[in-house]
Image (tube, grey):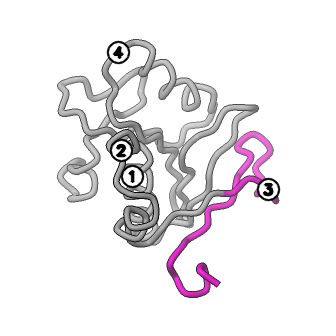
Amino acid sequence: MLKNAFIFYSAGRYDIKGKQLLKTLGKNYIIDLEFRNMLLGYRDADRGHILENIAFLELIRCNYRVSIGKVGEIEVDFVAEKPEEKIYIQVAETMEGEAVQERELRPLKQIHDNYEKIVLSMDKSFIKSYDGIKVLNIIDYILGWVL
């Protein structure tokens, strides 16, 4: 009922290597984060999930078909597709620290095709790429300030 009322959007899980939509383990994203805060209370520790929800909504707004990617046992936050393009996206609060960089870049490095791979974070950094994987500020990305 909540999906039919457009309170939640669902994203199915997509097997990147097998190139097929899986029937299980999809995710739901809420249309207005204030509903989430009302139900769960605002928790500062959930900023990564909040950013992921915001990125999902922006991709939907830009008319992408959005799925949750799966490469083996590793999850890619989003596989965003239009008829003429495909983008793989990871969302992280920050990319600071080697452990965080490894965790966020690892799924994208497992994908062996030539579609664009992006990590969105809150960082404002001079580092714009790791081995061809773009690292962009999520606010700049949403506002269209990055090329």
Of discs 1 and 4, which sits in the foreground? 1
> Is 55 in front, or is 144?
55
| Residue at 21% from the left image edge and 59% from the top image edge | 143
Q: Are marks 1 and 2 in contact (CB under 8 Å)?
A: yes
Q: Amino acid at mark 2?
A: Arg
Disc 1 packing (10 Å; few <14; some 14–19; many ≥20): some
Q: Amino acid at mark 3?
A: Thr
Q: Amino acid at mark 4?
A: Gly
Q: Work out whether 100 lies above or below 74.
A: above
Residue 16 in the image: state x and y as whole percent.
70, 43
Which one is earlier in the sequence, the residue at label 1 or at label 4? 1
Residue annotated with mark 1: 50
Using the rendered view, name the quadrant where residue 20 is placed.
bottom right
Residue annotated with mark 2: 47
| Residue at 55% from the left image edge and 87% from the top image edge | 5
Secondary structure of the residue carrying numbered label 2? helix
Question: From mark 4 to mark 3, how far is it between C-alphas?
Answer: 33 Å
Question: From mark 1 to mark 3, how far is it between C-alphas?
Answer: 23 Å
Of discs 2 and 4, which sits in the foreground? 2
- The image's mark for residue 97 is 4
Question: From mark 2 to mark 4, how far is it between C-alphas?
Answer: 17 Å
Which one is earlier in the sequence, the residue at label 1 or at label 3? 3
Residue annotated with mark 3: 24
